[in-house]
Amino acid sequence: MKESGRKQGTLSPCAACKLLRRRCARDCVFAPYFPADQPQKFAIVHKVFGASNVNKMLQELPEHQRSDAVSSMVYEANARVRDPVYGCVGAISSLQQQVDVLQNQLALAQAEVVHMRLQTHQFPSTSSSAMAATNNNSSHSRRSYYPLNEVEQADVEDSLWS
Ligand SMILES: [Zn+2]
């Protein structure tokens, strides 16, 4: 499993050792996660975290968690390069805002449902005017949430992992 990133019998160094211009040992900690054909993966984590920190972080983890750790470091490093001020916190905070907006929308919709049920079942005589007021409110709120661009968010999400 340790050697999974390398073809057996070849002496070509992993992407990390190639960039650091050092010999790639058989037990190289980087080799399984930074194959030679994806040099940009190591280049970006080296730029943001530094090779020796990445080395240390991987050494401190059990082997079965290292692959996930590398994926998240690559993601974080890409986010930091793309957004030098907020890094991946920018994405987290934007998603948190979307959650808040959607929770508000859900609460409004649930209130609307309760309202409509009450109108229909208990107070049939006043239903039409009250319902018109509710609809006006909710359609106005929905319109004001549209500036959040979900397509753009999805794009960022996909490409940061590469
Ligand atoms: Zn190596």
Image (cartoon, grey):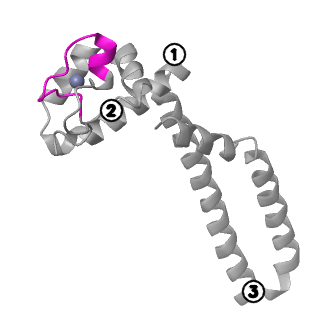
Front in this rendered view, residue 145 or 41: 41
Tag 1: amino acid: Pro
CA distance for labels 2 and 3: 65 Å
CA distance for labels 2 and 1: 27 Å
Q: Of helix, strand and loop, which one carries label 2? A: loop
Q: Quadrant of residue 15?
A: top left
Label 3 C-beta lies within 8 Å of the nearest ligand 1 atom: no
Tag 3: amino acid: Thr
Q: Residue at x 28, y 35 (%)?
A: 33
The disc label shown at residue 35, or none: 2
The residue to which callout 1 is attached is 84
Residue 123 rendering spot, x and y as whole percentages: 76, 85
Front in this rendered view, residue 10 or 92: 10
The disc label shown at residue 120, or none: 3
Q: Is residue 83 left or right of residue 10?
A: right
Tell me which label, 3 or 1, sits earlier in the chain.
1
State the extent of the magenta-drawn residues as a range: 16-31
